[in-house]
């Protein structure tokens, strides 16, 4: 059971990390998105005394700012700081090193 749980957790981790890499290093901003802070219910599976138990847990997600970048044929979404988000406008050309 522990081995199966480890495999599932590893698969989830790989899936999440594969989505974190950005494809573009520069491009034009085509949209901006703000995601306000919120609480997220996340059930946590634990094995206690050889029994599987689901423990409820709340996770606080902070504010997040995103810009969508478009190059010649590719589009990518970058998570940026609040100050950078406020500096740039749709239509601006940006490079990865700037934020």
Image (cartoon, rainbow, N blue to C red):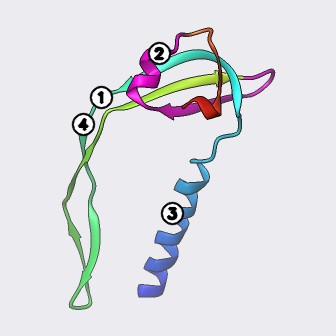
Q: Secondary structure at mark 3?
A: helix
Q: Measure the C-alpha gap from mark 1 to mark 2.
A: 18 Å
Q: What is the x, y in percent for residue 52?
A: 27, 79
Residue at numbered disc 2: 87
Residue tagged by mark 3?
13
Q: Quadrant of residue 28?
A: top right
Query: What residue lies at 30% left-to-right and 28% top-to-bottom?
Result: 36
Disc 4 to disc 3, C-alpha distance = 22 Å
Q: Is residue 87 magenta?
A: yes
Q: Nearer the viewer, mark 4 or mark 2?
A: 2
Whichever of callouts 4 and 2 sits on the residue coming sooner in the sequence is 4
Q: CA distance from mark 1 to mark 3?
A: 24 Å
Q: Residue furthest front?
A: 98
Q: Quadrant of the N terminus?
A: bottom left
Left or right? Give the position of 77 relative to 6: right
For the residues labelled 4 and 2, say whether their Cβ atoms are less than 8 Å apart.
Answer: no
User: For the point 58% across and 31% down, which residue is it?
Assistant: 77
Q: Which residues are magenta?
A: 71-89
Q: Residues within 10 Å of mark 1 (few under 14, many from 20)?
A: few
Q: Which residue is mark 4?
A: 38
Specify whether 87 is left or right of 26.
Answer: left
Residue occupying the point 26% across, 60% down: 43
Q: Nearer the viewer, mark 3 or mark 2?
A: 2
Distance in Å between CA atoms under marks 4 and 1: 6 Å
Query: From the image, which quarter does the C terminus lie in?
Result: top right
**Does dot 2 land on a helix, a strand or a loop?**
helix
In front here: 34 or 80? 80
Q: Earlier in the sequence, mark 3 or mark 2?
A: 3
User: Which residue occupies 55% across, 16% down?
Assistant: 31
Question: Is residue 70 shown above or below 42?
Answer: above
The quadrant where residue 44 appears: bottom left
């Amino acid at each position: 059971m522990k081995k199966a749980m480890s495999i599932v957790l590893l698969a989830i981790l790989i899936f999440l990390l594969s989505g974190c890499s950005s494809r573009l290093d520069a491009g034009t901003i085509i949209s901006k998105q703000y995601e306000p802070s919120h609480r997220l219910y996340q059930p946590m599976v634990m094995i206690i005394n050889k029994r599987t138990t689901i423990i409820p847990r709340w996770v606080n997600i902070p504010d997040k700012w995103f810009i969508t970048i478009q190059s010649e044929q590719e589009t990518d979404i970058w998570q940026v700081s609040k100050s950078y988000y406020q500096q740039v406008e749709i239509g601006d050309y940006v490079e990865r090193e700037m934020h």
